[in-house]
Structures are given as structure tokens and as C-alpha cells.
Image (cartoon, helix red, strand yellow):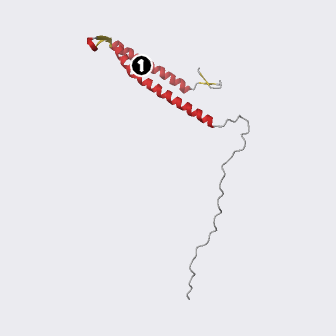
Amino acid sequence: MGRIVGNSGQTWPVPLASRSMQFLKILFWCLISFVAAIFTYGNWSWVTINLWGGLVAEVNLPFMMLFMFLAGVIPTWLYYRTIRWRLTQRLTTAERVIADLKPVVPMGADPGPVLAAPVAEAAPPAPRTPPKQPPLELTP
């Protein structure tokens, strides 16, 4: 049974979901390999490629397919890794700046009084005067 090791050396058992996902990944790659083997067996034929200057190359179809697949995947993968590396560098720089901005206080030490911004005192509200009404006229 696998175990996960933390930064402090603590270990925890691998969750069941992770183990089942590992099984699914292995199953997926086995199926892909099986399909590739069947494709290779069924299409083992020579393909003629006319190159420049009258050169002719004869290549097995599965090898040509593999070469074309890699020609498309490798540049995309390199671009992805480059973007991921750049984002990791930016995140590391941002974390370093944040750590520099925070004061370091040892555990258990009194950080001292917390200084709050002075609050301006508000003027007391003016007394309310009742609205003026015209006098009532009484007629007998």
C-alpha cells in the first residue's frame, strides 16, 4: 500500500480514489498499446515518400504515423512546459515578495501592541427641531 510523505516527514495512506485512478491510467495505456499493436500488424506496408532532388524514401506506415504524431506533440508539449515554468517562476517571485512584506514573529512571542489607525471623531448630531405648522383656526 502506498504512502504519501509530507514536508515534515509525516506519512499518510494513499486515498482509495488515487489508487483507483492509478488503475484506470494503467488500463487506459494498456488499451492504447493494444490498439497500436493491432494497427501496426494490420498496416505493415511500405510507403514511398518523394523527397527533394529526386530522392525517394520507403518507410513502414506505422513508423511514419509515429513520426508524424511526435512531430505534432513535441512542440505542443514544449510550449506547455515553458508556460508552466514561467508561471511557476512568477508564483515563486510573488510568494517571496509577500514573505518579505510580512513581519516575522517567532511562535509564542508577544507581537506587541497592535496599532490601529486613528479614527476621526464625528460631530454630535444636531438636535432635531419639529417642523413648523401654521396655527389651527377654530371656528364655532
Q: Position of residue 104 (x, y in %)?
A: 67, 35
Q: Position of residue 85 (x, y in %)?
A: 50, 27
- Per the image, the residue denoted by label 1 is 32
Q: Quadrant of the C terminus?
A: bottom right
Name, please, the residue furthest toward the left: 54
Task: Classify mark 1: residues with Cα within 10 Å, few (<14), some (14-19) or many (20+).
Answer: few
Q: Quadrant of residue 65?
A: top left
Q: Quadrant of the N terminus?
A: top right
Residue at image point 38% right, 20% down: 71
Q: Residue furthest bottom?
A: 140
Q: Quadrant of residue 124?
A: bottom right
Q: Is residue 110 left or right of residue 69?
A: right
Side of 22 relative to 126 (left or right):
left
Task: Tell me if 8 is positioned left or right of 67 in this view.
Answer: right
Question: Can residue 33 be seen here?
Answer: yes
Q: Residue at x 54, y 27 (%)?
A: 17
The residue drawn where x is 56% and y is 34% is 94
Q: Is residue 16 above or below residue 118?
A: above
Q: Residue at x 46, y 20 (%)?
A: 27
